[in-house]
Amino acid sequence: MNDRSSDGAPFGDGDLAPGTRTIHDVARLAGVSIGTVSKALNANGRLSAETRAKVLKVAKAIDYRPNDLAQSLHRARSMTVGILSNDSFGRFAFPIVEALERRLFDHGIAVFMCNATDDPMREQRHIAQLLGKRVDGLVVTARRADRRAPIEPAARGLPVVYVFSQVENPDALCLLPDDEGGARLAVGHLAALGRRRIAHITGPERFEAVRLREMGWRKALGEAGLRPDSSDCRSGQWSEAWGRDAAQALFSRRRAIPDALFCGNDQIARGAVDALREMGLAVPDDVAVIGFDNWDVMVEAARPALTSVDMNLEALGREAGASLIEMMGGRALKGVRRLPCSLVIRNSCGARGGAPKGENDHE
Amino acid sequence: MNDRSSDGAPFGDGDLAPGTRTIHDVARLAGVSIGTVSKALNANGRLSAETRAKVLKVAKAIDYRPNDLAQSLHRARSMTVGILSNDSFGRFAFPIVEALERRLFDHGIAVFMCNATDDPMREQRHIAQLLGKRVDGLVVTARRADRRAPIEPAARGLPVVYVFSQVENPDALCLLPDDEGGARLAVGHLAALGRRRIAHITGPERFEAVRLREMGWRKALGEAGLRPDSSDCRSGQWSEAWGRDAAQALFSRRRAIPDALFCGNDQIARGAVDALREMGLAVPDDVAVIGFDNWDVMVEAARPALTSVDMNLEALGREAGASLIEMMGGRALKGVRRLPCSLVIRNSCGARGGAPKGENDHE
């Protein structure tokens, strides 16, 4: 122990992974002290070029890898961050987390993944574990029903980014998709294609995303010189069954039949498209339909394939990674940032004039 | 540095996370040396009960958390494992990883998440990063098209578990769902319900899962005294479109019309159910249908809701976690282990006699 600490390599390397060579092996084989090995590998301290070369050669020959844990203690950076996710379903969290992990990995940072799944006690224990691991930052992601309470480490000065998740604290950085903007893209597109009565079928009102998308629907109608009619907006569930039921109700009316539907998600849109087909209405000729999420499984299986708003979750994940790196570098970032959505055109909106007949209607 | 190392607390705690109290704060406030704090917290070395109590009181009062990195060096265990995933889609990997993470967390082990997404160079860099972090073990999970090459650390003695992923190396531990058994459950169930011509529509032959499920279909037919007919087995894609096309072909035949369909996944089953409805055939009265995966989004949206084989991915994840912990404890585990699937009964197979009319056929 003394010889480790007296020559500037106080941390040793512990021989933690079975089969992994240690700094001791390098020292023994090179015939130098551990301190000398440390100096040679870290390129610091006074050392002859010859000795340095000898040490590096031995280290390479036995495939010695410096113990990153020891280096972490040394440089006061663990080069790790924690991700706390409450999205047990994974559909939204996964693309975000993947892009985030990729961005951080490119900066040499490893990611601890924690699934708290809406259990506050478990979340607390996860945070304690991550603080014990001396993470350099935290990312919190979630399903978005309501705003959540800020997590405790934010108050302790640890960089925290909320992505696809939002807290009341104005000092927190929250990255979200621009739901309202996405809705305006979709509804503006339908209006530009000449649709004049654009209805909206969406999910439960308790979701902020539902309220924002409805606002986008209203604004885009106004911008197109159309008047939103409250009877054209139906809020319910995030399911295909709800999409079918709501479409049946809207299109069984005696009058004021819509010529377009903007749906709050792709499942609703798919249910609506099925209901329209079964009512003998052609999509997009009689009714143009646009969904939200651009979820491959849904948009591609729908008949016709769905035009849909993409929240660009990968971009959101990359941005979360970049922001966290900036904050770890000392920059203070805060506030709610909404990243743009984009519109992915397929056959259900009528913008693709040349869709082969039969693809749009199998009956 | 010297006073740290000379009294048995060589690692310090580095004050890594901003705002986190360090061992130095505890020592200063308790009026003792850092070595004394270390002895008190680790309950080792000679120390009066009074001194120990004083240190613990101060540590608690200022919310001091021992630096887990330093402890990791100390006990030659990092209490971390890495998960390498190649399933960029996430649908299969996510439930496995979540259950695995939960199991390991309950043992105080944190999980590094790495997405290699079929890029061998990136995977190598991830493995190097994880070895640098001195992980105690690795889990490899993937989409299952083909067997993959074993990863390098297995040869170095680091515990590795392959889950939903398989390698040729007979010394590797591979945990997989029992695809053949799952198929036998489904087909046996249809036969027990009195179905006599049970066809099979499935995914691409290059997937081992496709070959095993087809074998299960053949064996279960044999066990029920039925004769598998090669014209009743159609291999194609994992999509709804393929399910529709294959069902249309099978049920447009002049004779030998099946009275049941076992499908290789839920998307195929859903497409088949749609095609059958559009051909005027009632599910389950005319044709009983069973899918595979028990993917909530698909099985619940299908009309009628799909009976499906569940691969019990959470159980697979838990088992992977438990196996890794055993291996980290020194037990040698190897070979291919297949965990049982189960059958989840809904309305498409006809076992639920009392399904309300109209739920099964919306047309």
Image: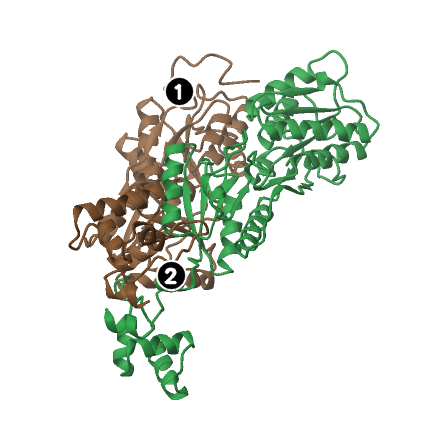
Chain colours: A brown, B green
Measure the alpha-carbon separation of dots 2 and 1.
63 Å
Q: Is residue A324 visible?
A: yes
Q: Crowdedness of circle 1 by 10 Å Cα count: few (<14), some, many (20+)?
A: many
Q: Amino acid at mark 2?
A: Leu
Residue A229 horizontal side relative to residue A300, left or right? left
Disc number for residue B287 = none
Give the secondary structure at mark 1: loop
Residue A350 marker = 1
Q: Find residue A210 and report its horizontal and vertical position in percent.
A: 39, 44
Residue that sits furthest to the right in the current view: B225
Q: Residue A194, located in which quarter of the rendered image?
A: top left
Mark 2 vs mark 1: tell me if same chain.
no
Q: Would residue A133 be found to the left or right of residue B155 on screen?
A: left
Front-lying residue, A357 or A49: A49
> Looking at the picture, does residue B288 appear above or below residue A13?
above
The answer for which chain carries disc 1 is: A
Which of B296 and A125 lies nearest the eye of the viewer? A125
Name the residue beneath numbered marker 2.
B73
Q: Amino acid at mark 1?
A: Gly
Going by the image, does B147 lie left or right of A264? Answer: right
Q: Position of residue B20 (x, y in %)?
A: 29, 67
Residue at 63% in and 30% down: B362
Identified at 34% across, 31% down, the residue is A186
**Residue at 43% across, 29% down:** A256
Q: Position of residue B300 (x, y in %)?
A: 59, 38
Q: Nearer the viewer, residue B231 or B269?
A: B231
